[in-house]
Amino acid sequence: PDPRDAEVQSALRDAAKPKSQVPVWRQGLAWSVLSVDYQRILTTLSDRARLHQGPLTCQEMAAVFGMDVVPARVEALRSKAKRLVARGWLAERQPGRFTLAAGVSGPGDGS
């Protein structure tokens, strides 16, 4: 057996744990490896992309999620969004405005 298979299985197991690291995006990686909070950000931005509505700021995301749009909530979202950018899931083409990265598509299709 290929030793990388074991690494992938281990990474997938670790990715499913709450408070886990965000894995680097790659073709075919399912959104389910991410925590619910990260999936919610991706789902919202995926819906906007599908409707050609463009990027969102973290304040706008907080409002979409029904959160109080207060600095603590907005900063928590910003740190999650920045982590998703760093790992290749999101793009930040304009400062503070987030959208899905090229190649990242809907939650279950693995493409």
Image (spheres, rainbow, N blue to C red):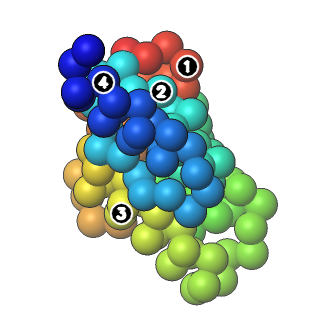
Question: 12 above or below 63?
Answer: above
Q: CA distance from mark 4 to mark 1?
A: 21 Å
Dot 1 amino acid type: Gly
Quarter containing the N terminus: top left
Left or right of residue 3, residue 74 in this image = right
Please state the horizontal and vertical placement of residue 46, each as a whole percent of the image: 50, 32
Question: In front: mark 2 or mark 4?
Answer: 4
Q: Element type at marker 2?
A: loop
Q: CA distance from mark 2 to mark 4?
A: 16 Å
Q: Element type at marker 1?
A: loop
Mark toward the start of the polypeptide (2 vs 1): 2
Total labels drawn: 4
Please name the residue that numbered disc 4 is placed on: 5
Please name the residue that numbered disc 1 is placed on: 108
Please name the residue that numbered disc 3 is placed on: 82
- Residues tagged 4 and 1 counted as in contact (Cβ below 8 A): no
Q: Residues within 10 Å of mark 1 (few under 14, many from 20)?
A: few
Q: CA distance from mark 1 to mark 3?
A: 23 Å
Please state the horizontal and vertical placement of residue 20, each as a whole percent of the image: 50, 58
Dot 4 amino acid type: Asp
**Residue shown at the point (51%, 33%) measured from the top left:** 31
Give 73 or 83, whichever is nearer the viewer.
83
- Residues tagged 2 and 4 counted as in contact (Cβ below 8 A): no
Left or right of residue 65, residue 25 in this image = left
- Residue 101 is drawn in which quadrant? top left
Please name the residue that numbered disc 2 is placed on: 30
- Residues tagged 2 and 1 counted as in contact (Cβ below 8 A): yes
Please state the horizontal and vertical placement of residue 44, each as a whole percent of the image: 58, 41
Quarter containing the C terminus: top left
**Residue shown at the point (74%, 67%) measured from the top left:** 67
